Image (cartoon, rainbow, N blue to C red):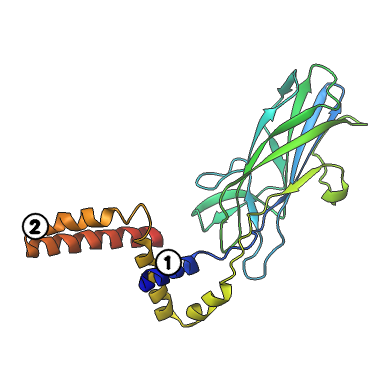
């Protein structure tokens, strides 16, 4: 019983100690001049990191498996017609070591916009939708993320032409602003994890073995143990041992290979 409790504790020690992850700060605004409406999306990426370089967000048209930014409109006023596909500015191109191909991306700031034709006065109308994006730096890629947006259409004093200007201070620009950090997870045993981690490879291996044993207590694993053992014991001792070794080796090779990939 004591060993089982220790194994469970080791399992939880191995869970990632995750702090709030970097995320872009998004701003969305919409302007109307006569029958033309422009919706602008601005993403200010997290600051550069000394050891990891600049964060980049994959732009429109970036090839798979990179996740190009994507905007889906789920709420549009009646009579709105998108005049063309979304456009973007400030795009860079280069080889990405994560995806082993040339990608297109934004660095430090991304700016996209879409122009609509409106059949009636839409000032004060709400435009809503979802932005999907992915950011990476030189060390890691964060999972693809989606965020909802809402913007209120405001009247523009001049015709809407050319490339929109970015807004320097998002918090004072009057646009809809929001950031999407990953949820922070506080682990009160972070100090306990530091000691085994500092002990080197052997300490890590012992933790991994303990966590693997603790995994036997999971409800999707524990009921399968007697079924698996009974299958091997129905054969002769030599055959059963050989089959069990092949079975175990296959599991080790499969999951180790997937982990390395």
Neighbourhood count class around disc 2 (C-alpha, 10 Å): few under 14, some 14–19, many 20 upward: few
Residue shown at the point (77%, 22%) measured from the top left: 117
Q: Nearer the viewer, mark 1 or mark 2?
A: 1
CA gap, disc 1 to disc 2? 33 Å
In terms of image quadrants, where is residue 217?
A: bottom left
Quarter of the picture containing the N terminus is bottom left
Q: Is residue 128 left or right of residue 212?
A: right
Q: Position of residue 59 (x, y in %)?
A: 63, 45
**Residue lying at the far left of the rendered structure:** 236
Q: Is residue 85 left or right of residue 101?
A: right
Check contact, mark 1 vs mark 2: CB within 8 A: no
**Split into 4 quadrants, where in the image is the C terminus?**
bottom left
Pinpoint residue 23: horizontal percent, then vertical percent: 67, 54
Circle 1 Cα neighbour tier, 10 Å, few/some/many (<14 / 14–19 / ≥20): some
Q: Position of residue 157 (x, y in %)?
A: 93, 31
Instruction: Please determine whether, in this image, residue 103 is positioned above or below residue 190.
Output: above
Which residue is tagged 1? 8
Q: Who is closer to the viewer here, 179 or 194?
A: 194
Q: Between 147 and 28, which is closer to the camera in this rendering?
A: 147
Residue on which the image places disc 2: 235
Which residue: 57% across, 72% down?
Answer: 190
Q: Is residue 201 above or below residue 106?
A: below
Among the 4 quarters of the image, the one containing residue 229: bottom left
């Amino acid at each position: 019983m004591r060993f089982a409790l220790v194994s469970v504790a080791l399992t939880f020690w191995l869970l990632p100690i995750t702090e709030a992850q970097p995320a872009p700060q998004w701003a969305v605004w919409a302007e109307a001049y006569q029958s033309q409406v422009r919706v602008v999306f601005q993403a200010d990426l997290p600051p550069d990191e000394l050891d990891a370089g600049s964060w980049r967000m994959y732009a429109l048209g970036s090839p798979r498996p990179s996740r190009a930014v994507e905007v889906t409109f789920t709420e549009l006023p009646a009579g709105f017609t998108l005049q063309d596909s979304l456009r973007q500015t400030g795009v860079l191109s280069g080889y990405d070591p994560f995806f082993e191909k040339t990608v297109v991306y934004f660095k430090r700031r991304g700016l996209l916009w879409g122009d609509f034709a409106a059949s009636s006065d839409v000032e004060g109308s709400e435009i809503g939708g979802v932005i999907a994006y992915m950011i990476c730096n030189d060390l890691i890629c964060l999972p693809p993320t989606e965020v909802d947006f809402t913007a209120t259409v405001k009247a523009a004093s001049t015709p809407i032409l050319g490339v929109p200007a970015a807004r320097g201070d998002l918090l004072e620009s009057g646009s809809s602003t929001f950031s999407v950090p990953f949820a922070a997870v506080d682990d009160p045993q972070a100090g306990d994890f530091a000691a085994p981690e500092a002990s080197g490879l052997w300490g890590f291996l012992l933790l991994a073995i303990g966590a693997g044993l603790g995994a036997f207590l999971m409800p999707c694993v524990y009921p399968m143990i007697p079924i698996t053992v009974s299958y091997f014991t129905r054969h002769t001792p030599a055959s059963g041992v050989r089959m069990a070794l092949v079975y175990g080796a296959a599991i080790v090779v499969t999951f180790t290979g997937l982990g390395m990939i």
